[in-house]
Amino acid sequence: MSDDKHGKIIGASRSRIDGPKKLRGDAPYAADHHLPNMAYAYGVFSTVANGRITGIDVSEARTLPGVIDIFHHDHFPNLYRTPSTFAQENKVDETRLPFEDAKVHYPGQFVALVVADTFSNARDAAYRVRVDYEEDEPVATLAQAMESGEPTPHAASGHTRGDPDSAWNDAPHRIESTYITPMETHNPMEMHASTAYWDKGDLVLYEASQGVVFARNVMAKVFGIPPERVDVRSPFIGSGFGSKLWIWPHAVAAAAAAREVGRPVQLVVPREEMFTTTGHRPPTHQTLRLATDANGKLQALSHDGINTTSMVNTYIEKTGSCTKSLYACPNLRVSHATLPANHGTPTSMRAPGAAPGLFALESAMDEMAESIDMDPLEFRRANYTETDESLDLPFSSIHLMEAFDRGAEKFGWSKRTPEPGSMRDGDEIIGWGMAACNWEALKMDCDARVSLRADGTAFASCATQDIGTGTYTIVAQAVSDITGLPLERIEVELGDSSYPSGPVSGGSWATATTLPAIAQAARNAIDALKTYATGDGGAFSGSEADTLTFADGTLSDGNGKSVDYAEVLNQLKLANADGEAHTPAATNDEYSFRSFGAHFVEIRWDPGISNLRVSRVVSAIDVGQVINQTTAANQVEGAIAMGIGMALFENTEYDSRSGRPVNNNYAEYLVPVHADQPEEVDVILLDHPDYAFNEFGARGIGEIGITGLAAAVANAVYHATGKRIRELPITLDKLMVT
Amino acid sequence: MRNFAYQRAGSVDAAVAAHSGQSSSFVAGGTTLLDLVKLDVMQPERIVDVRSLPLYDVERLDDGRLKVGAMVTNTDLAHHPIVTENYRVLSEALLAGASTSLRNKATTGGNVMQRVRCPYFRDGVSACNKREPGSGCAAIGGLNRSVHAVLGTSDQCIASHPSDMCVAMAAIGATVLVSGPNGEREIDFLDFHLLPGDSPDKEHALEADELITHVVLDAPMEGNRSHYLKLRDRASYQFALASSGVVIATEGGTIRDARIALGGVGTKPWRATEAEQSLIGKPANEASFQHAAELAFKEATAYEHNAFKIPLGQQAIVRSLTTVTA
Ligand SMILES: Cc1cc2nc3c(=O)[nH]c(=O)nc-3n(C[C@H](O)[C@H](O)[C@H](O)COP(=O)(O)OP(=O)(O)OC[C@H]3O[C@@H](n4cnc5c(N)ncnc54)[C@H](O)[C@@H]3O)c2cc1C
Ligand code: SF4
């Protein structure tokens, strides 16, 4: 939906401008950099989950061909921890440095690092480093953690209004259910990788990173040098889903090794260790209590979540983050608590908090609706609110009712017969379920630079990243929108910490944060151009700058004189006209900013062969202004695929005896393959600009699509089978009729 | 990965000779071997590359049997016209396995010889009698839902045989032709894979340095219809939780002959002979199939997480028989 504020390029459907580079192999990823004299590092990873290293024997490994050095806790430079604050932009989730001491906190922890002349030699030697441990009992699973002690509450992340416990006790209709979600692993295609070199005390790091500015600041803290002496580059990454937001131990290890051996060093984290030492979504245990009055209005809602964290840092999975404001309810509590386990430190994974949290809430909403004999969709409509009751502020723009209506219409919800198992097709039982989806809208500080260049092109740069989502393309669209130049004449560079400071690619805030800064920088570039043009020797010398107009690459004075901007610059022998801009994180404080939507899901269950599949998904989602139909729909489609994985397959399993993960590879950690994709996926983007949020009216789209999807599947499964599955994933053995 | 010597063999005799004398492995498609070498689970000192051997033919013998060279890829075998025409179960089984790119590499000989997917075998450190005889079996009492068996297990090893192709071959009936230091010999396909018993490290009937040259399929059962049904969590690219390969011939609604083999549930490609026998002379209906399915799992032992494989395997049998006789 285009409007008068912005031209047609905003909201258009455009292919990724970086696509051709990727197809040609011209888009270098972190491990694609092969520098002269480069050495390769390979980790030795702990095989125990809890304990101490009692000895490291490198004697055999040291003698192998090509080995340059072998680092471990007795042989590693002294480094510093990062203070890890978000405000200072040096946050990490695991603050412990590699090789700090002999302690082992989790399996897959770096215990040594071999540096050799080739990757194969490094790996060969790594396999022959002998490590002895003194082993303690591990806390390997959520169940073990729950038995190990009392969870630590984190009151600051919670919210209470009214008196939810009394209201629940007194209400005529109520339910209580506990939901469990497993550990999930991000599993981006591209391996975590670092290629590091030092040049006269300056560090250059090619890192698979969703946040080059944070990465630079962390490395500066770790090595005790000014941030200006560090350059982190991540022009292309093969996605991250959150696992590449913050620096993990391997990057520190690679940079330190490069300094010690005096050569560039490349380190690729093996797939197995991408399950342990680069974050994961922690398992959660969530108890929900819902109560309604006779009309189906929620009277009480409590959502108490517990997740495991590591032994070294606290990560809170805020499962109640959507619960506090999605529906109207006068008596409400959300709380979060953690329990330590012998795992690497958890981290944000696509829609942290909301993805597991809405599985629980939106399953519970269906359970509640059923207990009062109400259609699940009607029940949600009955509890709709336009006020964020946790903040007591109106939502800036809420179109959830339209999402319900359009989604239900497209899906055919009115034809649903409520009785479980009542809809059949041959051998298959059909189940229809739905759920709301929800995500907060955030925006950060951002700097950007746009140059109008003498060759008639424009150049935009910002130290944010394109993690495969289309940021390059929408930045070019924003430049095009302001300058009128076609996309072909706009070059964009991102993913280098030396560019103007930009946001991490996370929280679905990159679009809302970056585009306003880019647009303002483009306007400032035009102003600079006007100043040059009206100065001595300029094409409009003597005119007042503010009497000139700039459109489609041409400056005009309104009296019939128009000059192409390239000519203006060339006449003055100037390379470019630059504009820089800073746009603030602060938003209008009269509103709560959130995105809303609804998923409608059809599943098919063949009880004769215990086969479950998702056959149809309709998702109606409102994220404010859609900047690019192609890349936006792609984000939601991808999130639906990932949501199907969350619902049916994903589960990082730890052996409770050894504390080691057992399915830490791509064959046995199941994510959906093409054959698991529904025959029909329909994404409806409502596209109502939210100008209270930013000048583009865009709230961001990366995460909302996965929220609620697992609940919609679980609700559909219940509708087909009559079985309420409260523990993900919904595997066939949980549904079998025997 | 440890360094190893590499040699490409130009003839079967040369391959056998090169394999002798030290810890050696043949490599064909490499999809099992390279994986396990990179994980440091297999540590051959020498790798003998057999891909140049002239074992790429699929040939119908005068007695109606089909002789398949050990180097024929899974893709080529699945799409071979004689196979799609006469051994549908084999074509379907091959196409249900792995992924297109893996099948393009994987060979008939290599598939017969593929190793188990048990995570405790593959992690290189857990107790595993197959990897390190006498060390124990971490899968028993551990996470044994997906790639562990309920048939043919022992208290030493419960890993399921991962192959789909071999299940079809077990149903069809086949002979493995091998060549070794003492010349050529034949091994009945059903005798080729060994039960774990108390020596799970001994997986097959090959003697030292023997090479598989061919697998010869029995002549197709007269008037047969056949089918392979693989049940798993996701729709593709996963080893079978349970699978059923059936070959059946009926006359006027009565079953004349039947073969049933099972995958994902057995420690070897599992032929359900008693279940087959129960079908002969019976009407091709659900009651007969259900009875056969129960017989097939009569001796099954469930472990902590895989009890569901017993009913799932039965469902695979019933549905595959229903489909093929419909
Ligand atoms: C991710 C993944 C998923 C898979 N999924 C499936 C699946 O769903 N179903 C399925 O059935 N399989 C599956 N496979 C296994 C695959 O089918 C086997 O890896 C393949 O068939 C092995 O054949 P190859 O030629 O690559 O063998 P190689 O790796 O070359 O060899 C395997 C073994 O056989 C030995 N060998 C090879 N040729 C001979 C010979 N002629 N004589 C004697 N010994 C020999 C080798 O020394 C080695 O020990 C999967 C594999 C992977 C990696
Ligand atoms: S099941 Fe077999 S392969 Fe697995 S751990 Fe036990 S002995 Fe090893």
Image (spheres, rainbow, N blue to C red):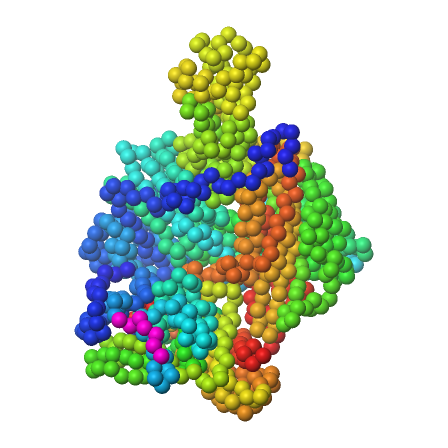
Which corner quadrant of the image does residue A378 belong to?
A: bottom right
Q: Residue shown at 64%/40% (left/top)? A: A687
Q: Position of residue A390 (x, y in %)?
A: 68, 43
Q: Which residue lies furthest to the bottom in this view?
A: B281
Q: Residue shown at 25%/70% (left/top)? A: B53
Q: Where is residue A619 in the image (x, y as percent from the top left)?
A: 63, 51
Which residues fall within the magenta stretch? B54-60
For the C terminus of chain B, the image quarter is bottom right
Q: Residue shown at 73%/66% (left/top)? A: A419
Magenta-span inclusion, residue A642: no
Q: Which residue lies furthest to the front in this view?
A: B62
For the N terminus of chain B, the image quarter is bottom left
User: On the picture, is A324 further left or further right than A75?
Assistant: right
Which corner quadrant of the image does residue A218 belong to?
A: top left
Q: Which residue lies furthest to the right in this view?
A: A294
| Between B146 and A314, the one nearer to me in the picture | B146
User: On the picture, is B209 further left or further right than B311?
Assistant: left
